[in-house]
């Protein structure tokens, strides 16, 4: 890992030297490092999505199909059909859930490497806070600043993503099937229909 950090040192240190003032440079550099981590993570996520796109679409379609069939079965009073359809819907939901966890990990993996690099340069630096914050104290170190910068960079990137050339295309691919797909119905429709019937 040390060899890798030595290779990227000149590039990453350049982010922290864009501003002459060292304090401002630290915050600007940390934000740019966090933004770079977000972009690399989102690129990894988009590649994983492209490889698994058909599988994810099939899971979504299965979830909607079996969920809606379970609602129809309850309306018809068929308990056995409801159980069978609900079991299939839960299976599809579980697969989608664990896939989304894996996708989240795919988008976050650059952050630990960025923090590892920062440790080499900023581990002994404490930034004093104007007031003492419970559970934080009167000063913060680089991980605290990086995590806040990462959250901010993620928000900025999510707003910009639909307008960026490559990521805008991925965004359209993700949102297009939702418009074409059958609507996922909710169990609240059962209560609405019983109210309108009475």
Image: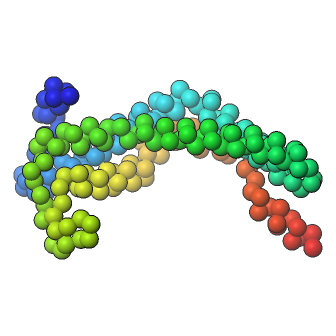
Question: Where is residue 146 shown, x and y percent of the image?
Answer: 25, 51
Q: Is residue 89 above or below residue 53?
A: below
Q: In which quarter of the image is the C terminus?
A: bottom right
Q: Is residue 27 above or below residue 104?
A: below
Horizontal relation, residue 133 to residue 56: left or right: left
Q: In this view, does 68 lie above or below 50?
A: below
Residue at point 13%, 60% (across, down): 127
For residue 152, which quarter of the picture? Answer: bottom left
Residue at point 19%, 52% (across, down): 142
Residue at point 72%, 38% (across, down): 62
Question: Where is residue 108 shown, x and y percent of the image?
Answer: 38, 41
Between 104 and 18, the one lying in front of the other is 104
Question: Can residue 28 be seen here?
Answer: no
For residue 195, which quarter of the picture? Answer: bottom right
Horizontal relation, residue 66 to residue 25: left or right: right
Residue at point 62%, 30% (across, down): 55
Question: Where is residue 83 shown, x and y percent of the image?
Answer: 82, 46
Horizontal relation, residue 17 to residue 191: left or right: left
Between 163 and 188, the one lying in front of the other is 188
Q: Quadrant of the N terminus?
A: top left
């Amino acid at each position: 890992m040390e060899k890798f950090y030595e290779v990227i040192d000149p590039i990453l240190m350049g982010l922290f030297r864009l501003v002459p003032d060292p304090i401002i440079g630290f915050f600007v550099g940390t934000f740019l490092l966090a933004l770079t981590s977000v972009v690399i993570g989102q690129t990894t996520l988009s590649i994983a999505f492209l490889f698994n796109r058909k599988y994810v679409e099939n899971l979504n379609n299965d979830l909607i199909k079996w969920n809606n069939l379970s609602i129809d079965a309850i309306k018809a009073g068929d308990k056995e059909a409801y159980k069978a359809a609900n079991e299939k819907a839960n299976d599809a939901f579980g697969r989608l859930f664990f896939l989304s966890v894996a996708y989240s990990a795919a988008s976050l993996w650059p952050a630990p490497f960025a923090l590892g690099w920062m440790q080499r340069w900023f581990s002994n630096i404490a930034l004093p806070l104007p007031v003492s914050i419970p559970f934080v104290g009167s000063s913060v170190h680089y991980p605290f600043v990086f995590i806040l910068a990462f959250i901010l960079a993620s928000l900025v990137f999510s707003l910009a993503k639909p307008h960026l050339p490559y990521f805008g295309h991925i965004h359209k691919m993700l949102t297009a099937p939702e418009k074409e797909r059958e609507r996922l119905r909710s169990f609240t429709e059962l209560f609405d229909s019983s109210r309108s019937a009475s």
